Image (cartoon, helix red, strand yellow):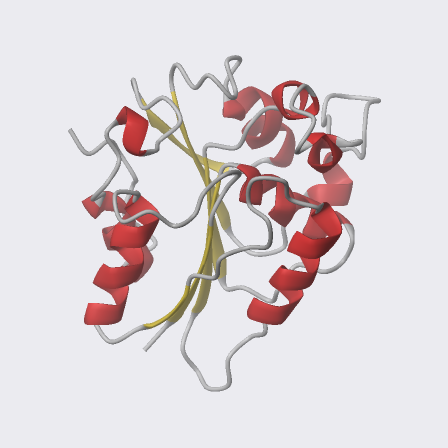
């Protein structure tokens, strides 16, 4: 049995139509432990509160099973900030999905603090070395993401040297772009060699 920590994004109240909700149920049905917490104040999050929640829910389980983290949207930035602060949970592998760009994040007052200093371009922000995850990490991103119009590969994937899965036409990889059930992510959870593609 493996343990999965599923982290949602801004304004996400874990709706049943979201692929993360579907995934949590599918993994539990297969006998895995699933942690899918409602992060504090999702409509007006504070970085300190979300980091505290990550500390609370990210404790590595006892035993020999894998500990896997899956983060979507704003929680990708939460994860990178935790890495920079030395507070990232001890995961065996990580899937980062559809992060918003630092510029878009900074333009939204409710979440702007998540972007402070996070520009990874040379000589800006924290710099890649400060936020490069220790665990094997895959970044999944789509074309036409309104929250990262330049592409998450540009902002995060290439600077951090992450394994990349590109989803043509995927948008923000959320229910608005057709991502409720997402079999490829479930397959990746149980086999890290699986490439994550679109679901249509």
Name the spot of residue 130 as percent of width and height, x first: 77, 43
For residue 27, side relative to residue 114 (left or right): left
Image quadrant occupied by the N terminus = bottom left
Which residue occupies 63% across, 35% down?
A: 160
For residue 190, side relative to residue 165 (left or right): left
Name the residue nearer the viewer: 194 or 169: 169
Name the residue nearer the viewer: 121 or 115: 115
Classify residue 75 by image quadrant: top right
| 185 in relation to 98, above or below | below
Classify residue 45 by image quadrant: top right
For residue 28, side relative to residue 56 (left or right): left
Name the residue nearer the viewer: 102 or 158: 102
Name the residue nearer the viewer: 12 or 178: 12
Name the spot of residue 91 as percent of width and height, x first: 54, 64
| 200 in relation to 66, above or below | above
Name the spot of residue 80 as percent of width and height, x first: 65, 44
| 151 in relation to 116, above or below | above
Which residue occupies 22% across, 61% down?
A: 26
Outermost right residue: 123
Q: How many marks?
A: 0
Name the spot of residue 77 as percent of width and height, x first: 62, 40
| 196 in relation to 121, above or below | below
Which residue occupies 72% across, 35% down?
A: 128
Outermost left residue: 200
Which residue occupies 42% across, 71% down?
A: 66
Image quadrant occupied by the C terminus = top left
């Amino acid at each position: 049995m493996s343990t999965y920590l599923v982290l949602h994004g801004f304004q996400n109240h874990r709706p049943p139509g979201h692929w993360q909700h579907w995934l949590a149920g599918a993994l539990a049905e297969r006998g895995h432990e699933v942690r899918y917490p409602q992060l504090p104040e999702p409509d007006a999050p504070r970085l300190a509160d979300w980091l505290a929640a990550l500390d609370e829910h990210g404790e590595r389980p006892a035993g020999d099973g894998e500990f896997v983290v899956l983060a979507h949207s704003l929680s990708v930035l939460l994860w990178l900030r935790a890495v920079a602060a030395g507070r990232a949970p001890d995961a065996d592998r990580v899937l980062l999905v559809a992060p918003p760009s630092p510029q878009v994040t900074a333009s939204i007052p409710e979440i702007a603090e998540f972007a402070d200093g996070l520009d990874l371009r040379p000589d800006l922000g924290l710099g890649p070395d400060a936020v490069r995850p220790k665990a094997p990490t895959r970044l999944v991103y789509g074309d036409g993401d309104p929250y990262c119009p330049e592409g998450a590969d540009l902002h995060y994937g290439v600077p951090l040297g992450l394994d990349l899965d590109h989803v043509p036409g995927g948008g923000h990889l959320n229910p608005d772009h057709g991502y409720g059930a997402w079999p490829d992510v479930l397959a990746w959870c149980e086999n890290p060699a699986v490439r994550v593609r679109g679901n249509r």
